[in-house]
Image (cartoon, rainbow, N blue to C red):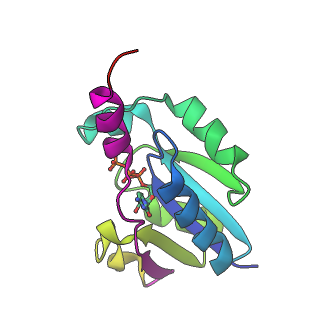
Amino acid sequence: MTTVITYGTFDLFHVGHVRLLKRLADLGDRVVVGCSTDEFNRIKGKSVAIPYDQRVEILLACRFVNHVFPESNWEQKREDVLREGANIFAMGDDWAGKFDFLSDIVKVVYLRRTEGISSTQVKVTVRESPKQ
Ligand code: CTP
């Protein structure tokens, strides 16, 4: 059984998220996601449109996701990898190199992002669209 672990905010769930999660599902048998809490996003200086519980509900409705747990700090990753029995630690390449320090316990891979979409971009588009 190969378990793939990944992290993210997954705000305003979009096709870039779907494609990443599909590729993670193709890498193994089980995909587990550390979804960043609203509080952790505040710490990172990011604001979310969709609250944590709903982002988790949406992630769990995606057929490529098997399990979701909260990401609430920068230091928990080693513990999560061990607890979840993860074999592959995968992130989008906006994080390239940032998690290589985990490669003593897990295979670390970075996947190409889908171009032209992000939660931030969706927020900008909605903000700029004319009011009905
Ligand atoms: N991701 C991706 N392609 C995109 C957007 C995101 O592959 N176009 C991946 C990220 O690399 C990350 C995961 O999806 O591994 C969760 O990303 P997240 O930060 O939640 O999404 P973004 O849309 O990039 O959010 P933001 O605009 O707030 O940075």
- The answer to whether residue 61 is left or right of residue 90 is right
Question: What is the tally of numbered marks visible in this picture?
Answer: 0
**Ligand 1 position by quadrant:** bottom left
Q: Please provide percent x and percent y for residue 99.
A: 35, 72
- Closer to us: 42 or 19: 19
- Closer to us: 53 or 83: 53
Q: Residue furthest left?
A: 45
Q: Please provide percent x and percent y for residue 69.
A: 59, 47
Residue 113 falls within the magenta-colored stretch: yes
**Residue located 38% across and 54% down the image:** 117
**Residue located 34% across and 53% down the image:** 74
Q: Is residue 129 above or below residue 131?
A: below
Q: In this view, does 32 lie above or below 42?
A: below
Q: Is residue 114 above or below residue 2?
A: above
- The answer to whether residue 10 is left or right of residue 25 is left
Q: Quadrant of residue 85?
A: bottom right
**Residue located 50% across and 73% down the image:** 89
The quadrant the C terminus occupies is top left
Residue 36 falls within the magenta-colored stretch: no
Q: Please provide percent x and percent y for residue 129.
A: 33, 28
The quadrant the N terminus occupies is bottom right
**Residue located 33% across and 37% down the image:** 125
Q: Please provide percent x and percent y for residue 114.
A: 42, 65
Q: Is residue 100 above or below residue 70?
A: below
Magenta segment boundaries in residue numbering: 104-129
